[in-house]
Amino acid sequence: MTITLRMAWRNLWRHKRRTWLTVGAMVFSNLILVFSISLQLGSYRMMIDNTLKSYTGHMQIQREGYNDEPKMRSSIDAIIPLADKVRKQLGSDTVAARGVAFAMTSSEERSYGLQIVGVEPEFEPNVSTLPGLITKGSYFEHSNAEEIIIGSVLARNLRVGIGDELTLLGSGHDGSFAAGIAIVGGIFESGIAEIDRSMAQLPIGYFQNLFGMDGRGHNIVINAPELSQLSSVQHAVNNILTANDRLVVLDWEQLQPGLKQAIQADFTSAWFMYGVLIVLVAFSVLNTQLMSVLERTREFGVMMALGVKPARLGSLVITETFVMSGLGLAIGAVLGIAMTYYLSIVGFSYPGMDQMAERFNLPDRMYPSLSLLSIMLGPSIVFLFSLLASIYPAIRLFFLQPVAAMRAV
Amino acid sequence: MSSIVCKDLCKTFQQGEEIITGLDHVSIEIDAGDFVCLSGPSGSGKTTLLNAMGGLDTPDSGRIRVGNTQVDELGKGPLADMRLHKIGFVFQAYNLIPVLTARENVEFVMQVRGEPAQERSQRSHQILKEVGLEGMEDRRPAQLSGGQQQRVAVARAIVSKPTLVLADEPTANLDSVTAGQLMDLFVELNQNHNITFVIATHDTRVMAYARRLIKMRDGKIISDEKQQQPQIED
């Protein structure tokens, strides 16, 4: 160990209580940051997963331009064989074809405009949580059933129940008149009023017949096993589509830009709070190191008289801060990891969370997600700001005059 | 050859509204290997002169040469280099670094000079033995008596083989026996290593060791006498 490092270490313990208080502030902030960032990243992961799994999926194959301007005619030919091919190539069942149309839906008493989604009954539950939210009746049994699944708000508005008949009137793929009848087979309650009010599902076979799709559909929804595998899955799907340059694979950020913006907004506001915490710790370090430099003015004067240059003295002060911050980082990160790891296994909830989660088909506990990023990001920034805070006390040494400094009490 | 040449040094200090004269046109030449005492009452200018010689303080006017170096022309960095490589300092209050042991205090200056670890270790051991602190190398200043601390300070001052040692009231905090031992050590180092010593003091016992005694008052040299130095037996 060099004399500078030895001096730095011993100088820290000249005022044990003061050093421990500063290290304690760092430990506390590092612990909070490791836990909060892990929780934040974990909740974003959960938020993305749950939002996307409810309907949108991690990615979709669409006709080029469909996402910006969804037109009935911007369709994918032979969508079921293509979905089968994607399932086979990926070796995954979390792939489902859909068709989307709009129709006026009438009961005996009332009529409402709806978005009608044609789904593959055997695969739709693998890409969407909506089939699991059926509160009355059941989901489709086969793809040609002349059944319709509607939301609870719509059922109330139309004054219909299971087994009632609905008339659908809309435009077919070729612009012709599309009309049909479907029996209400199930009623779902997503908890999102907009979905419960204005969306209904038909089996894709019946949907294609009704709207003259001739085997076409509008998108193929794909869920990756993990969010972290999105890019590799997207790459694999792109390879499958090389033969058809009019189809594109859009990821969730393109499909749901609002979700990404919401996450970014939350991230920014959280970092504002973290910033306040980090600045407070930095000021604590500044105070400690400034005090330390001021009370050692005479000592620094002596060292300057012996021929030590201010830069070397400054490096001593920064080394002291480095050691102190390193201690705060190590202890804080270890405690933060231990606490976060424990909660990432057992999870935690707050009063009322379980009822809300059940209603929205979400997990009833929150699980922070530990990663190298969530462990190191906060403590590294605290470490960096602590070092920055020691620059001012170090710079003061450049203005010391040996004789005046040695006269200091 | 002269070790130090000071020409027409002037220095004033502002204390409140009062201007105090530290040095008033002081000119002096000190030969290499000499053993000089600057004496005089408090405020006579001896510490100011010592500080100016050591490049710790800058005179308002006049010129100072130490060896071949024109001190008054140097900037902060070169001045620090000169102090590090050519001058050893011994202060009244010992001024050891409290968190370092006796050995580390001595080695510190050598490390700043960039000397290799092995040489630092050997030389600090040898110097501490020379100043009579063998076996106390690993004690911190707080575990040493005043005399022992001053010996460490002397060891630190001479470890880098300076040509000049400037000592400011080195015996002020020591009892007479310890002060005598310290002065014997100074004379021994002066005689054996040909180091020039300039000691600021108002202790008459210290003055008795000097080969040259310069008396100051009100920032001026009022007398400059050569005298017989007691011989120290090896």
Image (cartoon, grey):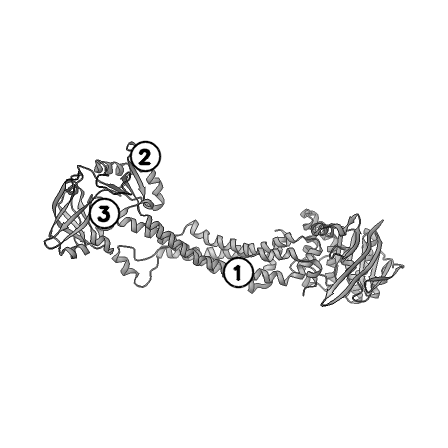
* Chain of the residue displaying label 3: A
Residue A89, quarter of picture: top left
Of badges 3 and 2, nearer the viewer stands: 2
Inter-mark Cα distance, 3 to 2: 26 Å
Inter-mark Cα distance, 1 to 3: 54 Å
Please report the residue visible at 65 percent of the width from the left and 61 percent of the height from the top: A297
Q: Does the image show residue A17?
A: yes
Residue at label 2?
A239
Density class for disc 2 (Cα within 10 Å; few <14, some 14-19, many ≥20) is: few
* Chain of the residue displaying label 2: A
Residue B4 locus on image (x, y percent): 81, 52
Residue at label 3?
A125
* Chain of the residue displaying label 1: A
Residue at label 1?
A283
Numbered marks: total: 3
Amino acid type, callout 2 = Asn
Quadrant the C terminus of chain B occupies? bottom right
